[in-house]
Amino acid sequence: MSDVLIIGTVAFDTIETPFGKVEKALGGSATFASYAASFFSSPAVISVVGNDFPKDYVELLKKKDIDLEGLQVSGKTFHWDGSYEYDMNEAKTNKTELNSLENFKVKVPEKYKNIRNVFLANIDPEMQLETLKQVNRPDFVVLDTMNLWIKIKKKALIEVIKKTNVLLLNDGEARQLFDTVSLVKAANRALELGPKAVIIKKGEHGALLFTKNKHFSAPSYPLENIKDPTGCGDSFGGAFIGYLAKTKDLDEKNIRRAIIHGSVMASYNAEDFSLDRLKKLAMSDIENRYKEFQDIREF
């Protein structure tokens, strides 16, 4: 039975970086998040794809025991075309084709409604709200978002934040959402809305955790080979909630450990396009890099 419910996008990604290019590779926030979560837990996905979505992609996800009953099929698959310069922290969107995502209506399958852990991966906040309406009072809700929703659907996003336990943002989004240059002020204002914790992702510079009385600075991993950062934030979020679902421990110290596991998964994801690096990953690789993170932070 699934123990993590993930709503987000399943997409085709066309991506060009200084280190290569892929056309219509498997992507989307729910894709990266569920694949990363699957190393620790049993994810279920709510999303939509088109009739053009390859069976090979479906089988790849199913092989990781990702439940796809909530994956609707209609029209053509959402397609994002983006590129990166040598500053890999920021993507340039060349083209977005919403396709089936444009008319997507959230429908939570009956067997998903009692899943206790919910990850609202990056998607329209109104869809995130609709998901929460259809599930039965989950124990733990994690929310991710992006600058677009802050710009055009801020009111709905604030409503989602009020219903979550942990808010994930990158540093630019945190400043944008709360109109401040101070990440500390942004985190405190987010905490005032209701979440018990706020995690601010800083890309190659690690991540910051803020709770009511404490904060924690997680290191980044010094990668020598970076091909494509697409999906790193989603992989972080999926591994984060997957680890917490597995350990069933929401203590602040275990949340710190979950952040490091998220950072481990994000660092591996950046080493290749799409899921190509994660497909080759073993638990021993995750454990070894986790130990390296511990050594980086020890002094």
Image (cartoon, grey):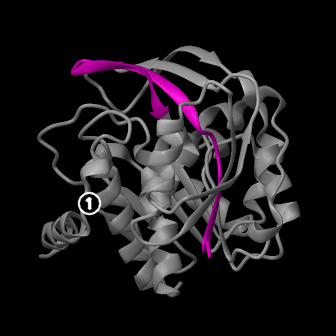
Query: Residue 191, image x and y in percent?
Result: 65, 67
Does the rendering let one see residue 205? Answer: no
Quick one: which residue is furthest to the top in this view? 94
Query: Residue 260, image x and y in percent?
Result: 33, 67
The magenta region covers 1-26
Q: Is residue 7 magenta?
A: yes
Quarter residue 287 falls in = bottom left
* Tag 1 residue: 219
Q: Is residue 178 left or right of residue 202?
A: right
Between residue 197 and residue 96, name the one nearer to us.
96
Magenta portion: prevailing SS class? strand
Between residue 180 and residue 172, name the one nearer to us.
172
**Amino acid tagged 1:** Pro
Quarter residue 225 falls in = top left
Does residue 104 sit above or below 288 in this rendering? above
Quarter residue 254 falls in = bottom left
Query: Residue 12, image x and y in percent?
Result: 53, 27
| Secondary-structure class at tag 1 | loop
For label 1, the crowd category at 10 Å Cα-Cα, with few meaning under 14, some 14 to 19 and many 20 or more, is some
